[in-house]
Amino acid sequence: MRTLLFLLQKEFLQVFRNRTMLPIIFIMPVVQLLVLANAATFEVKNIDLAIVDYDQSYLSSQLKSHFTASPFYTIVANEVSVSKSLDMVHADKADAILVIKQGFEKDLLRGHQTELQLLVNAIDGSAAGLMNSYSGQIIQGFIQEQIAQRANVTVPHITIQEKFWYNPDLTYSHFMIPGILVILVTVIGMFLTALNIVREKEMGTMEQINVTPIKKYQFILGKLIPFWVIAMFELVFGLILSKLIFDIPLNGSLLLVFGVAGVFLVVALAMGLFLSSVAESQQQVMFLAYFFMIVFILMSGIFTPTDSMPLWAQIVDLVNPLFYFMKVMRMILIKGAGFMHIMPCLVGLMVLSVLMLTLAITKYRKTS
Amino acid sequence: MKRSNNSIWGFIRKEFFHIFRDKKTLLLIFGLPVAQLLLFGFVVTNEIKDAKIAVFDQSKDYLSLQLVNKLVSSGYFILSDNLSNASQIDEVLKAGKAQLVVSIQPNFAAEFQKQGVASVQLNADASEPNTASILTAYASAIISDFAAENSGMPQQTLVSVQSRMLYNPDLKSVFMFVPGTMALILMLITAMMTSISIAREKEMGTMEVLLVSPLKPWQIVLGKVFPYIGLGFANALLIIILGYFVFMLPMRGSMVLLLLVTLLFIILALSLGILISTVSKTQQVAMFLSMFALLLPTILLSGFIFPIENMPVPLQWLSLIMPPRWFISALKTIMIKGEGLAFVYKEILVMLGMTIAFLSLSIKKFKIRL
Amino acid sequence: MDSSIVISVNKLVKKFGNFVANDNLTFEVGSGEIFGFLGANGAGKTTAIRILCGLLEPTSGDIIVAGFNGYTQRDKIKANIGYMSQKFSLYEDLTVWENIRLFAGIYGVSRKLIQERANLLIENLGLEDYRNRPVADLPLGWKQKLAFSVAMIHKPTIIFLDEPTGGVDPITRRRFWEMIYEAADAGTTVFVTTHYMDEAEYCNRISIMVDGKIVALDTPSALKAEYNAESMDEVFVKLARNSQRV
């Protein structure tokens, strides 16, 4: 116990004296939150639309005004030929082209079927899908209006009320921020721990520690406790920033958040310890940690729903600590979920923490 | 002259051996792009299928049952729960047992047929806003269809919308992530690895040994970066081959132009790596500078994952000075749109300018220290 | 076994795969002795010293250090020895005082004693001005002296010094050897490796390793007589010339 205190004192002294670490601990959350929360959005808000109107009629201008009225669309060109508009798409000056063929109004008025053509730049597949469905909705609105003006019989229909729970304005940052906090905590827990230990190896101070009668558990605890504390601090700091800057909802119990984070950090730290015993140089450990982080983050559901992943990926996710933590953070912070709701995830994290810690400690013994 | 030529080749050979002896790192360098491509290709998908829904059917008549059947048979939804009272909605959404709860009004069939209007409420878990809006859009479309089918009116569509998806008719995400992965991996291998490996020589004190050797400083730096050009290029080829054969990415433009642009980007990334190494004393500093100056922007501000047009204006400006943004843009134009030099000259000029700027800055820094 | 023997090694073998780093080493070191451990680069000195310090597990052979078994009681060995590696390995970002406190603390020295010994140590080395400055600011010679003193902070039975004077100026080297003599006079056994043959002359006894084997072991004067040499330098060159590994 006494030995441990000396080690902890040393570790904290070093962290607070390190001119690389300190800025990272304080600046990283700010930068990540500001940049990530603003940049990481799949919303499609500014669609540059070129309209080629061969009809030049009252109804075609009615249709155009539907697009102008939508906040999503900016009409960047009018009344040019299709090929000219295509050039604009090539040069990234337009995202989509709407072609209204000649005779559009005439067909509509006679009750004949008519057609519109929509050309979408689909290099970004998901954005193209959204653009397509937005345009479809606007055109649908236009048609409904036409039908309503003409028909006087009521057609039986179903009114659909949409209710968006927990995030009525569909604010994307409320979705991203819990995810960013997870990444933040992981970087500190896994990355910095691994880097710190490998640095001691490289510098030779590890050997000096190894010739002392220090026990393995003392050394490991001496390394894990400081980074656990720093990462927890980071989480608190990040939460405060998110509340102040983005006004994210804090619907659930913060105590529960910290409880789960505490368990998650044990897994992350154990992974850091494990990586540090596999790697010999800081360059190597950085690559290793980066590799696992990328895989874990992409599979965690930070950007895309895990339910839609292929089955094998969902099975692999059972050993992905970020998957559980990501889910729990969103459940508690945004939905206000309680202990019983997150129990399965917490159990998963606990099992992982025991497994990972055992693995890390056995591996660590062999190398020294 | 001849002697110094020999010694620089010797030095480059030493650096090559150094990299190839480190089997773990080598494995990672080539494993990383493969893993990343596979993840983006098969795991990270915006496509919604088998979303879990719950139904709160207050009517339970033939029509409401048909509606539920129609929703489930669409392939988008799986029915996970039947609710018996409204308070359960919050419960299933909170626990994540369903992402959408379809609530059908009492006397659904009667209202629909006698009053001509019935109502359905879609309760979406909007903690994932995109999923929520996509799910409600899908459900709304199915319900509207259902209403039209059961309205007893002749089917009539006045306007049909013909959509054509340019360049990417199947809306595959591969067009986004292959160029992005390439930029990211090249940044990682070239800029990050060189900056760390030069910083390492400094930290270990071996840089001084090299500096007093007959090698000139530029030769030392060249020797350090040369192997990484090779590694980076091999990696770029691997990504292109994987993209082509596994993900069916088209190669519409000129391969030569593509490789030239790639080479230019590798040199640009290296010059950035050299610049970083001249300002950092230790490996840790080099590593974190690279993380903040290179990797995060590459992922976030280059249009790799998130479209630049939707970002706040200050971030859009910031993205202009991100080298990968130009590289990715050039890649897409060449590979996917199949355009030639006329459409990418701007990107090439910007990258050339950046390379020159970074190199002259690092030479200045280097001289000051000597 | 003689109670004044503090290191006893019998038929020590250490293999790394097929490579035999230590081939059948047998020697004893007495209490208070200054034992020089010589050999060319790659002869296997560092491997042997790491085994004696409990950092490496031997392949076979008997090892008793400070009365403890080299296989089963490595923690006990570690508590009774000091070690200073050829690479400076105190924490450069901690101050002189913080380094002393850390290592003394790890060895279980009481807080009161830590204060006393630290004050004495700092005074002896003349480091008063550097007490609260990071170790990185110290000149190399002082770093080495500090590392030695820190390795002695818990008053170990044996101190292992792995090339302690590499890259140090002659005056500091002289001062360093004075410190070694002081330690030996106080009863600490000194086990030292070096490349400087003049330093070898300062040792009570020396062993010379070539290709993993001990080829000579005696007092410096006896070795010079045996090999008919003027200096230890000559002895060493005569022995090491036939090495396969250099």
Image (tube, helix red, strand yellow):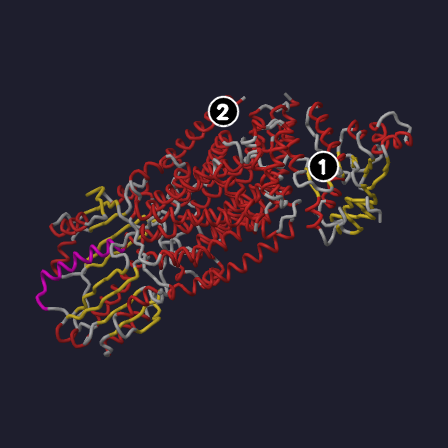
Q: From the viewer's perspective, is residue C223 above or below residue A129?
A: above
Q: In which chain is the residue bearing label 2?
A: B
User: Residue C161 — which label?
Assistant: 1
The local secondary structure at tag 2 comes to: helix
Mark 2: which amino acid? Ile
Query: What's the residue type where badge 1 is placed?
Result: Leu
Q: Which residue is mark 2?
A: B363
Does B178 sit left or right of A131 as displayed? right
Task: Using the image as rendered, state which of residue A175 and residue B235 is in the foreground.
Answer: A175
Give the camera-side residue of A257 and A274: A257
> Residue A9 appears at what percent x and percent y?
52, 43
Vertical arrangement, residue B283 with respect to residue C171, above or below: below
| Magenta stretch holds residue A140 | yes
**Is residue A280 toward the left or the right of residue B368 in the image?**
right
* Residue range highlighted in magenta: A133-153
Reply above or below: C80 against A315. above
Question: Is label 1 on the same chain as label 2?
Answer: no
Residue A167 found in image quarter: bottom left
Q: Secondary structure at mark 1?
A: strand
Which chain is indicated by disc 1?
C
Spatial CA span between label 1 and label 2: 43 Å
Q: Quadrant of residue B317?
A: top left
Of badges 1 and 2, nearer the viewer stands 1
The answer to if B310 sits in the magenta stretch is no
Asked whether the viewer can see residue B225, the reply is no
